[in-house]
Amino acid sequence: MPLRVAATVELVSLVVLLANLVTVHVDGVAALVGPIHGCAYLAAIALTVARAGWRSRATAVSLVPGVGGWAAAAVLGPEPYHPSR
Amino acid sequence: MNAVLLAVHVLAAIVAIGPVCVAASMFPPEARRALGHDAGAAARLPVLARICRTYALVGIAVPVFGLATASSMGVLTEPWVLVSIALTVAAAGVLAGVVLPRQRALLAGVGVREDLVASTGRLAAATGAFNLPGRW
C-alpha cells in the first residue's frame, strides 16, 4: 500500500512537471512539484529495497523514472499480511 | 518560493529525524533487555524498529527539499552546504546500511544469543554515529 501511494505520487507529479514544461511553464510549479517528485521517487525505491533487498529485479525496475514505482509494485505483487507490523 | 521550500525542509527535519534519533537510540538497550527475557521490552522492540523505518522514509524529504532550497537560493556550492551534504550522505548511509538492517536482524533473533547481545553494542555504536551528524 505505501509503495502504491509513492508510485502514484511519483507518476502524477512527473506528469504535472512535464505538462507544466510544455504549456504554461510556471517556475513556482517546477520548484514545488520537483522536490515532491524527487521524494516520491526515492521513497518508492526505498520501499522496494525494504521488501525485496538491494540485488533484486524489483529494485532494478524501481529505478526507472516515472513508472518505476508501479513497475516494482507489479513485480512484487500484493504485500503479504503481517499481523505484527 | 524559497520560504516554502525552507519551511518544508526544516519541518521535515524536526518531524522525521527527531523520532529516528530517539527511537534508534532506545533500541539497543531495549534489545538487551529483550534478550534477557524481559517480555515488555520484547513487545516494545518492534514498535521502536517501526518508528525508525517509517520516519526514515519520511526523512527522505529532508535532503530533497534541502537541495531544492539551496538550489533555489543559489547557495548550492557554498562550503557549509557541501559539508552538510557530505554529513547527510554519511548519516543516511549508516542508517540505511547498518542501523536498520541490524535492527531487522535482531528482531528476527536468528543466531547465538551471545552474538546477538554483542551485536546490540555494535548497533549502539552505529546509532551514535548516525545521531551525531543527524543532530548537527
Image: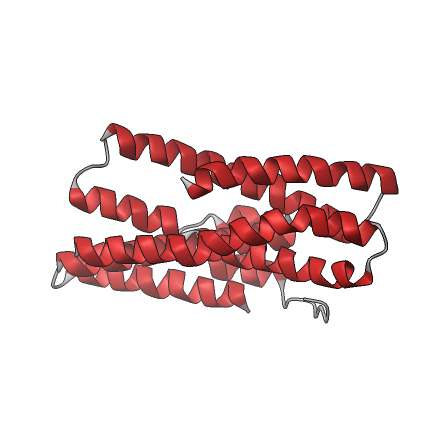
Query: Quadrant of residue A84 in the image?
Result: bottom right
Residue in front for this viewpoint, B16 or A48: B16
In front: B77, or B31?
A: B31
Choose between B108 and B13: the one closer to the eye: B13
- Residue nearest the viewer, comparing B14 with B60: B14
Q: Residue at x 58, y 54 (%)?
A: B23
Residue plotted at (28% across, 31% down): B80
Q: Looking at the image, can residue A55 be seen?
A: no
A2 sits left or right of B46 in the view: left
Q: Residue at x 51, y 41 (%)?
A: B131
Task: Please identify the quadrant where the C terminus of chain B is shown.
Answer: top left
Coloring basis for residues = secondary structure
Residue A34 in picture, x, y percent from top left: 28, 55
Q: Is residue B126 above or below residue A25?
A: above
Where is B32 relative to B85, above or below?
A: below
Residue B27 in the image: x percent, y percent?
Answer: 66, 50
Q: Tell me which corner region of the image, top left, top right, bottom left or bottom right, holds residue A17.
A: bottom left
Residue B56, image x, y percentages: 51, 52
Q: Quadrant of the N terminus of chain B?
A: bottom left
Q: Is B79 placed left or right of A66 in the picture?
A: left
- Name the outermost residue toward the top: B79
Position of B58 compared to B24: left or right? left
Residue B5, image x and y in percent? 25, 55
Q: Is residue A1 visible?
A: yes
**How many numbered marks appear?**
0
Quadrant housing residue B88: top left
Which residue is located at x 64 percent, y 55 percent? B49
